[in-house]
Image (cartoon, rainbow, N blue to C red):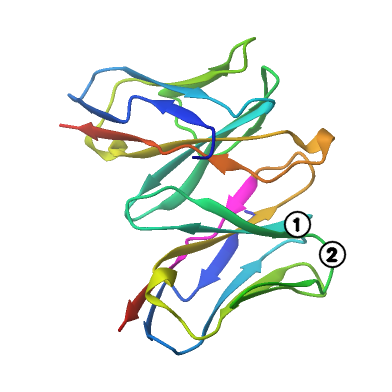
Amino acid sequence: GQQVMQIPQYQHVQEGEDFTTYCNSSTTLSNIQWYKQRPGGHPVFLIQLVKSGEVKKQKRLTFQFGEAKKNSSLHITATQTTDVGTYFCAGLMGSWGKLQFGAGTQVVVTP
Amino acid sequence: DSGVTQTPKHLITATGQRVTLRCSPRSGDLSVYWYQQSLDQGLQFLIQYYNGEERAKGNILERFSAQQFPDLHSELNLSSLELGDSALYFCASSVGPDRGGNTIYFGEGSWLTVV
């Protein structure tokens, strides 16, 4: 069936280092969204990418949408302890399709 | 605060019982979504409603049902509960695709523990 795969599942990062999490879909997506869930919290919307090849930045976070609209990445530079949490990508399949979430990347930051 | 309200926040019940989880979407949002989050399954999409009608269905068990009422609040009914149903149940809302809004906003969730 239609799936959104996200890797890695876990990411241990030293404070100050960079890391990237990747999201891949088996089908073309209408858009892709990224959410962050802090420990004990609920997913919070970060950004939405709609256009093929789109790149958006939010401070130290860079989001990319692949040319084929089947993959996306989130790159965080100079990781801080506030970046701890689980980052989910979610792909929209069709305007009325369900928003399919990846399994998430759980990020742990070591000071 | 996302503006999505869920009740109850915590619920402990016995196997075989039935519970109802309630959700009030953000003001102006017509779409309501239900997700189940457990440790080993991530965020599982259950069902989506738009302006009272079911729009998309995910991995929702037959023991579970949901509805969206005319005032747009939604309820998720879980019956014949099993231990494996213990999870965090999120409700989320959006304005709706026909109004250009696919971004969904999550409530704080309802923790269900089945003992």
Give the CA distance from mark 1 to mark 2: 7 Å
How packed is label 2: few (under 14 Cα within 10 Å), some, or many (20 or more)? some
Q: Up-down: is B93 above or below B53?
A: below
Which amino acid, by three-letter code, is at mark 2? Answer: Lys
Label the magenta part by its dominant secondary structure. Answer: strand
Picture quadrant of residue A89 = bottom right
Q: Give the x, y percent position of residue A94.
A: 78, 47
Q: Up-down: is B38 above or below B48?
A: below
Q: Quadrant of the C terminus of chain B?
A: top left
Numbered badge on residue A31? 1
Q: Give the x, y percent position of residue B58.
A: 56, 39
Which amino acid, by three-letter code, is at mark 1? Answer: Asn
Q: Residue at x 48, y 46 (%)?
A: B44
Numbered badge on residue B32? none
Q: Give the x, y percent position of residue B5.
A: 47, 28
Q: Nearest the camera: A79 or B51?
A: A79
Q: Residue at x 34, y 56 (%)?
A: B40
Q: Nearest the camera: A30 or A1?
A: A30
Q: Earlier in the sequence, mark 1 or mark 2?
A: 1
Instruction: Read off the chain for label 1.
Output: A
Q: Residue at x 47, y 37 (%)?
A: B107
Q: Residue at x 23, y 20 (%)?
A: B16
Q: Which residues are magenta?
A: A99-106
Numbered badge on residue A51? 2
Asked whether A6 falls inside the magenta stretch, the response is no
